[in-house]
Image (spheres, rainbow, N blue to C red):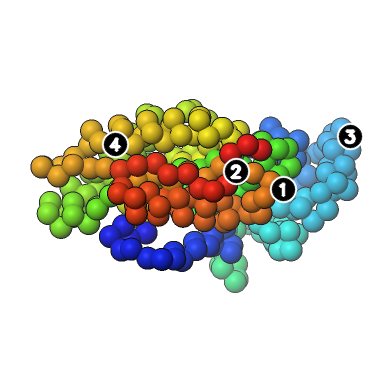
Amino acid sequence: MSTSKDKDERSPRKPNDECNIDRLRRTTTPEGMSVELVSAFAGDRSMTEEEKREINEQQTVRGLLFYSDLFYAISHHYFAPEIAETLWGKVLKHKHLLSEILKRNIRITVATLDFFSNINKDFISPTVISEENLVEIAKNAMRDRMTGLYNHTSFYELLELEFRSHRRYGAGVSIILLDIDDFKAVNDRYGHQAGDQILIDLAKVLKQQVRDSDICCRFGGEEFVVVLPFTSSAVEVGTIAERIRVKAMELGVGDLPITISLGVAICDHSVSSPHELIEHADRALYRAKRAGKNRVAFSTVPTVL
C-alpha cells in the first residue's frame, strides 16, 4: 500500500490462485493425518489393520480431499483436490524410481520434497535431501528473510487455515493490518539501510506484543499483518492493536519519529472468504490513514460471532 496517496477506492488484494496451505499448526485437528500414517500408506512399511481402517475411513469421508491431506501432512503444503490425486501418483512413481536407482527404500517425505524441488517435466537425476533437513527447509520457505516473520504467501496459507476452522467449527479469527506512516521519508532522508532496520525493529515489536497463539507476518514493503486465531472480541483485538501502536512509537531514526496505522477486521459468518476479511482490514487501515494516521480503526464487520 502506498501510504502517501489518497484514493477514493483501494484495489482489492487477491491471494495467489495457487497458494498453498501450511498445515504445521493443525496436525491435531480431526481432519489431520499423521506423517507416519501417510508413510505407511505410501509403502514405506507395512500398514497395520488399524491403519488400514483409518485410511479407508479417511478416503470415504474426505473424497478427493484425501489426496490433499496426504500432501498436507508430509510436505507442509496444500494442493487443490483436482490435482492432488494425479500429483500423488507422480510422487509415488518418483519414490519407486529413486528407490530402484539408490538400491534402498526412499521414504515418501524425501521423495515428495525431491520431486517438487528438482523435477520439472522430465526426470533427470535424483537429488535426495536428507529427512533431517525437511523441517528447516520448510521453515525457511515460509519466512521473510529480513524480519524472520512469516512471509506474504505464508500469511494467505495460515489465514486460510484459520478461516476454515472458523467456518467448520465456529472458531473466532481476526486480523490486524498495519502500515508504517510516511515510511518513504525514512528511506529518503536516512537511506534504505535505516529503513530496513526500522522494519526489523517493528517485527520485534510485533512478536513481543502479541500472544503466543498469534501469527505475525510481513505482508510486503512496510506493511505487516497479525492473524489472531480463536479471537472475536473487539476489546481483545483492540487492546493488542493499541499495544502495538504505542510500542512502535518508541522506534525512530535520527530526528524522525515512527508511527503506525492499524486496521482491524473481525470475522463473522457473513464473511465469505479470507480475501474478504483482508479487504475489511484494508479499508479500516485506509480510514486510519485518512483520519490522521497513528491510530487504530475497526472495519464494519460485526464484532460478535
Of the 4 image quadrants, the one containing the C terminus is top right
Dot 1 crowding, Cα within 10 Å, few <14, some 14–19, many 20+: many
Q: Position of residue 37 (x, y in %)?
A: 75, 38
User: Mark 2: which amino acid?
Assistant: Pro
What residue appears at the point 15 percent right and 58 percent down from the top-left corner? 188
Mark identifier at residue 248: 4
User: Mark 1: which amino acid?
Assistant: Asp
User: Mark 3: which amino acid?
Assistant: Glu
User: Mark 4: which amino acid?
Assistant: Ala
* Residues at marks 2 and 4 touching, judged by CB atoms closer than 8 Å: no
**Eye-nearest disc, 1 or 2:** 2
- Residue at image mark 3: 49
Query: Left or right: where does residue 184 sit relative to residue 169?
Result: left
Q: Is residue 211 above or below residue 43?
A: above
Query: Left or right: where does residue 61 sit relative to residue 29?
Result: right
Of the 4 image quadrants, the one containing the N terminus is bottom left
Cα separation between marks 1 and 3: 20 Å
- Give the mark, 2 or 3, whose residue is nearer the N terminus: 3
Q: Is residue 260 above or below residue 211?
A: below
Cα separation between marks 2 and 4: 27 Å
- Residue at image mark 1: 69
Mark identifier at residue 302: 2
Cα separation between marks 2 and 3: 48 Å
- 140 vs 257, nearest the viewer: 257
- 255 vs 24, nearest the viewer: 255
Cα separation between marks 3 and 4: 56 Å
